[in-house]
């Protein structure tokens, strides 16, 4: 193919705009590469750089300001065979900074061309993240209070594996774009250019001045040896392939007749580290094995190693509607923190409610029947109190029996953990 | 009898897998994070891709890119994430990009309460985008619904090429419960219609009441996609007639299929004068309240909406017709009730809502029904 340019949509840049030269250089680079049109996608966002996709006869995706790299990453992950080119201005680079950094860290095989023309051309020449502090811009004096950022320096430190800076007027631009596209990994090419519509009206910027800027801050020169590593997609697919098998849902069959097959509301009041959530799951597994419907909600701190841990479990022969606790039938009071979290329930408990209270835990006055057990005295560690209290329930055949508890433990634990947990259970039963 | 035991978030992930989802991108946020965790377990063994975005905006961007390459995509977040999704929700609506968004709602405004449920975003999901063009919002009431409705959500996203929300809630997403897999009622899968014409592919050429046929970016035929106002050819347009037709089609493609989109459950009791309308987790407490009222000799009928947007207007009119009084219960201070009042203009519509971080108990609902 001689050209990928879209003859029905010729470029419409302002006279003298460097974007026009970059369009032609990108076309020449695509011709040199010789990739079929349908294997290239140009992804753009907002600003004059966002016009690029319309000028080419390749796949095109034009989106929201600064987000082009995110669509590009989605496309590349979905179709690794695509040659993905992103054009973005200094505006898009600024607003999409997080995506630029993430793309550098990921190293997907894509090419980002940042068309740096030092201002927001489309909206009136406002200052961007690359505008010099002494420039005259459309945002009055605001640029004077900030400094411009060094795009190449930032992307290099963020992990881009190919970084170069080049004048949009450089005759070598097309070759540079070819090298960037041929690089297997994330390539960033910063082009410096003139915005004749806005910027050069008020600032002395010429191709010669751009050459001087580049002489002062030379291009990193392409491949960044210290950043070289696997392409993200390759690495991702390799790691994903090593992942285990698809996790099938955990299915429990009814296999026991409940000793006590009525609706139960069980509240376990404990603290972080006491395996409260695990004990709650055990009650559920046991309940399902007895043919009941179950639901469980857990309440714990976001700092998971500290504070209360509360499980609220419903077991019912009927389908469960409202999942809140209304009248608990069983309360396991295993820590002061847990009790504090549900202090209000104690006064309203029914005389039929069974409350198990560990000896060291204080509970508010309650009309319920309270059994106090000193787990410490029978050498059960605090981390096993929740499990031990389930064994107490099994002993009384409240909610579950020993067979159901053993079944639940077997379902959830590997052999080693199961045997350890049975040691605790045997101390009670 | 064999039960599975899972939280609503796992059920969303299983529904997505059942629907053929092969791409997920998301950013961790309580109470939606476990959808991401589950997809990370489920997608790789099936050859799918699961990505943690650098933020919510990027996550949606990855999904948009992957969807345009032909993938069936899911993302998951909560209210603060929907705020950040907004610009890309608009993009997906206007540019007809199929995607499914699970919103495990939490109590707002703003960062609000990470671990407290509420149906906070019912209007936000519908209107949190530019232009006012519609989306589809489905509201599950339990884990089983999460699985089933996620399959419907993918079907709708594929057919209508628009974002489809699962309006879950912390109280569903993070509550584990048992259900019988044999009770699942999954619809047959729907895939987006591929373009099979012989002429040149015009990416947004469509019947006035349909989404356009799809071809992926990366296929043999060149595809143009743009967030800008475009004509059928995918190029920017300022032609008022073309703009108007595109805008209208975004509405009509959903309106024309309203009856099929409108999912619901009902319990119509003969000789009752009150219909209680609810959705999501609240409809479970409504069912309990209705059962208790029947025991007290004051039965009511109930309607639980599973499709909230587009508002199932003809369904509401038909179901409400025989009733003297409508009672709407919501886990917020009144969002959807305004739609019901609009549709059932002239009917007595009473409301009870609660926004305090806890579920509405059946007793409160009974009070609302009995205190006329």
Image (spheres, rainbow, N blue to C red):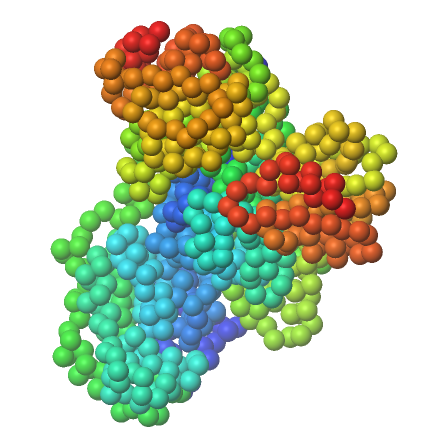
Quadrant of the rendered image containing residue A172: bottom left
Going by the image, does B243 lie left or right of B219? Answer: right
| Residue shown at 65% from the left, 70% from the top | B243
On the rendered image, what quadrant is the C terminus of chain A found in? Answer: top left
Q: Position of residue B103 (x, y in %)?
A: 51, 47
- Residue A246 shows up from this direction: no
Q: Nearer the viewer, residue B252 or A304?
A: A304
On the rendered image, what quadrant is the N terminus of chain A found in? Answer: bottom left
| Residue shown at 35% from the left, 28% from the top | A362
| Residue shown at 31% from the left, 33% from the top | A272
Q: Position of residue A90 (x, y in %)?
A: 33, 73
Numbered-mark total: 0
- Residue B337 shows up from this direction: yes
Q: Position of residue A327 (x, y in %)?
A: 55, 27
Q: Position of residue B305 (x, y in %)?
A: 68, 42
Going by the image, does A263 lie left or right of A309? Answer: right
Q: Eyeballing the image, is B355 above or below B370?
A: below
| Residue shown at 57% from the left, 20% from the top | A263
Q: Eyeballing the image, is A299 above or below A167?
A: above
Quadrant of the rendered image containing residue A93: bottom left
């Amino acid at each position: 193919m001689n050209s990928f340019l879209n003859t029905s949509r010729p470029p419409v840049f302002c006279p003298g705009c460097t974007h026009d030269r970059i369009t032609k250089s990108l076309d020449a680079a695509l011709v040199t590469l010789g990739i079929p049109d349908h294997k290239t996608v140009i992804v753009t966002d907002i600003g004059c750089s966002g016009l690029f996709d319309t000028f080419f006869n390749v796949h095109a995706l034009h989106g929201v300001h600064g987000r082009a790299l995110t669509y590009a990453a989605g496309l590349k992950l979905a179709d690794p065979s695509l040659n993905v080119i992103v054009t973005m201005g200094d505006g898009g680079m600024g607003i999409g900074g997080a995506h630029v950094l993430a793309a550098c860290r990921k190293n997907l095989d894509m090419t980002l061309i940042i068309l740096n023309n030092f201002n927001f051309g489309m909206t009136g020449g406002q200052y961007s993240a690359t505008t010099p502090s002494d420039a005259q811009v459309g945002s009055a004096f605001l640029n004077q209070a900030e400094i411009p950022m060094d795009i190449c320096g930032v992307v290099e430190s963020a992990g881009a594996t190919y970084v170069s800076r080049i004048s949009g007027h450089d005759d070598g631009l097309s070759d540079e774009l070819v090298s960037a596209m041929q690089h297997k990994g994330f390539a960033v090419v910063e082009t410096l250019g003139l915005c004749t519509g806005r910027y050069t009206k008020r600032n002395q910027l010429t191709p010669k001045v751009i050459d001087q800027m580049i002489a002062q801050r030379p291009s990193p020169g392409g491949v960044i040896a210290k950043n070289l590593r696997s392409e993200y997609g390759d690495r991702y697919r390799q790691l994903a392939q090593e992942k285990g098998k698809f996790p099938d849902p955990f299915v429990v069959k009814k296999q026991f007749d409940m000793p006590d097959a009525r609706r139960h509301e069980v509240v376990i009041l404990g603290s972080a580290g006491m395996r409260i959530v695990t004990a709650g799951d055990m009650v559920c597994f046991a309940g399902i094995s007895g043919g009941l419907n179950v639901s469980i909600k857990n309440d714990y701190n976001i700092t998971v190693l500290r504070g209360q841990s509360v499980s609220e479990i419903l077991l019912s022969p009927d389908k469960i509607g409202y999942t809140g606790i209304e009248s608990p039938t069983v309360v396991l009071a295993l820590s002061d923190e847990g009790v504090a979290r549900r202090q209000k329930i104690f006064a309203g408990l029914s005389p039929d409610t069974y409350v198990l209270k560990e000896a060291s835990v204080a509970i508010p006055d309650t009309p319920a029947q309270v059994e106090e057990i000193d787990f410490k005295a029978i050498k059960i560690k605090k981390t096993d109190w929740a499990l031990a209290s389930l064994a107490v329930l099994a002993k009384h055949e409240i909610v579950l029996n020993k067979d159901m508890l053993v079944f639940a433990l077997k379902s959830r634990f590997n052999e080693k953990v199961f045997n350890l947990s049975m040691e605790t259970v045997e101390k009670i039963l | 009898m064999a039960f599975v035991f899972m939280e609503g978030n796992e059920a969303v992930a299983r529904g997505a897998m059942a629907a053929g989802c092969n791409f997920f991108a998301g950013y961790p946020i309580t109470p939606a994070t476990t959808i991401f965790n589950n997809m990370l377990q489920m997608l790789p063994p099936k050859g799918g891709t699961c990505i943690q975005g650098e933020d919510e905006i990027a996550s949606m961007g990855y999904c948009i890119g992957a969807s345009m390459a032909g993938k069936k995509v899911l993302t998951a977040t909560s209210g603060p994430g929907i705020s950040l999704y907004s610009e890309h929700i608009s993009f997906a609506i206007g540019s007809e990009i199929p995607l499914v968004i699970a919103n495990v709602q939490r109590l707002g405004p703003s960062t609000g309460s990470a671990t407290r449920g509420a149906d906070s975003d019912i209007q936000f999901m519908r209107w949190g985008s530019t232009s006012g063009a519609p989306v589809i919002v489905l509201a599950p009431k339990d884990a089983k619904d999460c699985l089933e409705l996620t399959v419907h959500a993918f079907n709708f996203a594929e057919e209508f090429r628009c974002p489809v929300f699962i309006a879950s809630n912390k109280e569903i997403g993070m509550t584990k419960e048992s259900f019988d897999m044999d009770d699942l009622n999954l619809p047959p899968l729907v895939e987006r219609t591929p373009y099979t014409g012989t002429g040149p592919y015009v990416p947004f050429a469509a019947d006035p009441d349909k989404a356009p046929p799809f071809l992926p970016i990366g296929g043999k035929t060149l595809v143009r996609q743009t967030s800008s106002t475009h004509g059928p050819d995918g190029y920017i347009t300022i032609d008022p007639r073309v703009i108007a037709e595109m805008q209208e089609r975004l509405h009509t493609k959903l309106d024309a299929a309203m009856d099929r989109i409108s999912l619901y459950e009902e319990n119509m009791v003969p000789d009752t004068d009150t219909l209680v309308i609810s959705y999501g987790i609240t409809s479970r407490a409504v069912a309990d309240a209705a059962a208790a009222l029947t025991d007290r000799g004051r039965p009511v009928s109930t309607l639980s909406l599973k499709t909230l947007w587009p508002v199932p207007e003809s369904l509401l009119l038909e179901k409400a017709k025989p009733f003297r009084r409508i009672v709407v219960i919501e886990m917020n201070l009144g969002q959807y009730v305004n739609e019901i009042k609009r549709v059932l203009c002239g009917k007595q519509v009473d409301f009870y809502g609660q926004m305090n971080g806890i579920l509405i108990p059946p007793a409160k609902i009974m009070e609302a029904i009995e205190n006329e």
